[in-house]
Image (cartoon, grey):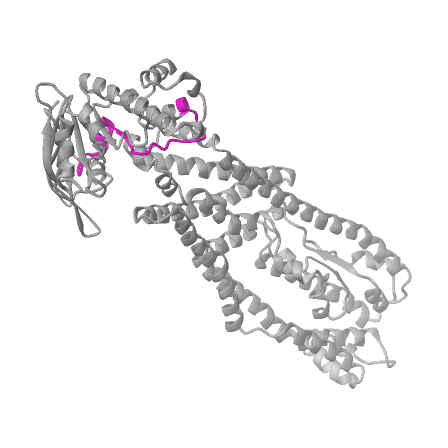
């Protein structure tokens, strides 16, 4: 049983070790940097959304003022859709680096618009973001290994082991107290910036505490592994570098090899349509429609919207209702591919969730992104909200287009608004 | 307190399938200094480490104050002070801080004046007390560890080559200290290859060779053990 005196003794003892203090300061600096960079990115995204939102209303109002038909109004008016970062997103940016979180949507075919995103430097994307989740899931195990791997073996190598165990009231208390003090110090320097960041971003306390508990669970896992392996190998006379090598090999396996190999295996196993094929099919369908008989477009369109069957007569070679009908047909043609594409993403995510049980770093990252609403589920949720919004635009415009209503700017006040 | 404070009975230790200690039998009484003398690889340190619980007997028993090392090692450790051959304390702590740390490990709280008294007793110069151990010579580290042993007030002292690497003056001081401790009732078990030192302080000397006691010498009429007699045992090949 550890007494308070054991704890205070080891705290004073370790606080006198310069290398431990320097190490903890470096970890604190890394933690501060990870939180700061997360907050900077989150605020940049938030600022972008706010500035786009300001322009969105103005641009649309200006565009609508110049229109004389609902068809051209739908064509020239853009609608901002966006997925604001959650208050805790600064800690785990997750899929926000990969999936788009803002769009300017028109009532044209959707598939071509929904996967449109800003182009980032692919080499920078490959490196990944140095956020808190990365620090905890990938780097923290290394910190623990560095701090705890040689708790016993270093004393043996320094020639103090026998003196320590003979002197100590209980040698297990000695090692446990020492490991606990180091682990708690590590937790403090890692978590302090998180809580400060959460306060700045006004994140919910319960979610922040949950994130801290995930960190703690991950730390306990690696702490237990490090101490157990360190003890067993030290008992067999293995040196500190050998213990460190064994633990680093384990880290490499769990934090790098398992995620990379499983990602490759999942991508090979779960069949997914090519995104390029999807876009190509939609573009070709839309472009070909110009040269096809009207009836081809109407037949396809009416299969989904039979209620407009009595309103398909054309009075000229171009009418907006026909134009938007073949835009919709473009989406219809790619519907199966698009569903398969999204199902494959969800399946891959489910499979990665199973693999994560064999890779605590992967599991940690998944739990953190889930908590921060930056995981694949959140991204697919946003995509679905964009689809729903686009659908609501069609439902708004179709009666106006098919009933040949006279353009009235006031009607546009009832345009659907995107709700994030 | 039993008369037999330290005892080995048919003690055997195997390390990597080799018989390092082979049927060892001896006892050490209260206030006695017993030296196990032998050359390199004779099994001296292994014998000592068996009493510390760092090495397990393959058969036989090793006991301290009637407690078996197999069953009561934690209790034994609370009654034993150990002085390793090369005292390595924490270089980033001062002599006094090292003593405070190790005493705290043992669950003992000693006031600073008592620590200073112990350091004075072992003749560690006062200007070194507050210097980091990294600046200490081997003899100074040895004295610090002896002061620690004194402060623990352990009834049994286990010493591994205690005078190895010390200068002659430090050896003399050390031998005087051991004699004083024994006179005050401490039981001292030391392993050494220092024939002169052993003869100076020990009440009995066991000659160890290949894990067996091959000769035993003891004081007669309170005189030191005859160094020539012991040395002859070495030179005649009893001890290699």
Relative horizontal placement of residue B48, taking residue A109 as reference (left or right): left
Q: Mark yes or no: residue A24 visible.
A: yes
Examine the image and state in which quarter residue A227 appears. top left
Relative horizontal placement of residue A218, taking residue A285 as reference (left or right): left
Examine the image and state in which quarter residue B168 appears. top left
Check the image and report above or below for B239 versus A335. above
Query: Can residue B90 be found in the magenta stretch?
Result: yes
Query: Can residue B13 be found in the magenta stretch?
Result: no
Relative horizontal placement of residue A330, taking residue A246 as reference (left or right): right
Coordinates of residue A127 in the picture (x, y in percent): 62, 57
Coordinates of residue B156 in the picture (x, y in percent): 20, 26
Residue at (62%, 74%) from the top-left corner? A274
Coordinates of residue A102 in the picture (x, y in percent): 71, 57
Extreme-bottom residue of the structure:
A293
The front one of A158 and A90 is A158
Residue at (24%, 22%) from the top-left corner? B175
Q: Mark yes or no: residue B67 visible.
A: no
Coordinates of residue B34 in the picture (x, y in percent): 16, 28
Check the image and report above or below for A282 versus A229. below
Q: Quadrant of the N terminus of chain A?
A: top left
The front one of A404 and A18 is A18
Q: Which residues are magenta?
A: B69-97
The front one of A64 and B195 is B195
Residue at (47%, 57%) from the top-left corner? A252
């Amino acid at each position: 049983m550890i007494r308070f005196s054991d704890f205070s003794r080891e705290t004073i003892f370790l606080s006198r070790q310069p290398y431990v203090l320097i190490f903890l300061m470096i970890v604190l600096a890394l933690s501060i940097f990870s939180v700061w960079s997360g907050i900077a990115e989150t605020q940049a995204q938030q600022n972008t959304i706010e500035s786009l939102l300001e322009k969105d209303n103005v641009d649309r109002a200006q565009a609508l003022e110049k229109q004389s038909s609902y068809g051209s109004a739908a064509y020239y008016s853009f609608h901002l859709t966006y997925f604001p970062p959650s208050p805790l997103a600064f800690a785990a940016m997750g899929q926000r680096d990969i999936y788009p979180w803002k769009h300017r949507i028109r009532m044209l075919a959707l598939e071509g618009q929904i996967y449109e995103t800003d182009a980032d430097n692919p080499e920078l994307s490959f490196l990944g973001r140095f956020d808190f989740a990365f620090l905890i899931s990938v780097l923290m195990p290394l910190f623990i290994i560095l701090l705890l791997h040689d708790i016993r073996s270093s004393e043996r190598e320094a020639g103090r082991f026998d003196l320590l165990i003979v002197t100590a009231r209980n040698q297990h208390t000695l090692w446990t107290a020492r490991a606990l003090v180091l682990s708690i110090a590590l937790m403090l320097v890692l978590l302090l910036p998180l809580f400060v960041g959460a306060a700045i971003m006004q994140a919910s306390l319960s979610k922040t505490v949950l994130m801290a508990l995930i960190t703690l669970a991950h730390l306990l896992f690696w702490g237990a592994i490090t101490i157990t392996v360190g003890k067993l190998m030290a008992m067999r006379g293995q040196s500190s570098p050998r213990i460190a090598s064994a633990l680093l090999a384990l880290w490499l396996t769990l934090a790098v090899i398992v995620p990379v190999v499983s990602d490759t295996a999942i991508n090979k196993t779960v069949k997914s349509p090519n995104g390029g094929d999807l876009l190509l099919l939609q573009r070709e369908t839309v472009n070909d429609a110009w040269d096809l008989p009207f009836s081809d477009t109407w037949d396809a369109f009416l299969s989904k919207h039979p209620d407009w069957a009595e309103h398909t007569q054309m009075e000229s070679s171009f009418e907006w209702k026909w134009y938007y009908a073949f835009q919709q047909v473009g989406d219809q043609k790619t519907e199966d591919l698009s569903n398969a594409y999204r199902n494959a993403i969800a399946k891959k995510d489910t499979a990665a969730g199973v693999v994560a049980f064999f890779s605590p770093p992967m599991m940690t990252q998944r739990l953190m992104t889930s908590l921060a609403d930056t995981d694949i589920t959140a991204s697919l949720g946003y995509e679905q909200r964009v689809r729903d919004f686009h659908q609501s635009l069609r439902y708004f415009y179709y009666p106006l287009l098919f009933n040949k209503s006279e353009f009235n700017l006031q009607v546009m006040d009832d345009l659907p608004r995107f709700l994030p | 307190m039993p008369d037999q404070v330290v005892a080995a009975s048919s003690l055997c230790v195997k390390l990597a399938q080799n018989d390092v200690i082979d049927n060892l039998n001896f006892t050490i009484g209260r206030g006695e200094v017993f030296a196990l003398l032998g050359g390199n690889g004779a099994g001296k340190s292994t014998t000592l480490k068996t009493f510390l619980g760092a090495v397990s007997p393959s058969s036989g028993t090793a006991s301290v104050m009637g407690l078996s090392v197999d069953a009561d090692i934690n209790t034994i450790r609370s009654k034993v002070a150990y002085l390793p051959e090369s005292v390595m304390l924490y270089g980033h702590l001062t002599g006094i801080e090292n003593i405070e740390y190790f005493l705290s490990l043992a669950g003992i709280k000693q006031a600073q004046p008592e620590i200073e008294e112990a350091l004075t007793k072992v003749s560690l110069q006062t200007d070194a007390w507050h210097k980091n151990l990294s600046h200490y010579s081997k003899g100074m580290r040895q004295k610090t560890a002896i002061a620690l042993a004194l402060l623990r007030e352990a009834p049994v002292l286990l010493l591994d080559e205690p005078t190895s690497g010390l200068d002659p003056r430090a050896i003399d001081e050390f031998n005087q200290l051991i004699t004083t401790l024994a006179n005050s009732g401490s039981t001292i078990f030391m392993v050494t290859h220092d024939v002169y030192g052993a003869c100076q302080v020990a009440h009995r000397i066991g000659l160890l060779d290949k894990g067996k006691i091959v000769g035993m010498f003891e004081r007669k009429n309170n005189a030191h053990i005859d160094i020539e007699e012991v040395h002859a045992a070495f030179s005649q090949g009893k001890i290699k």
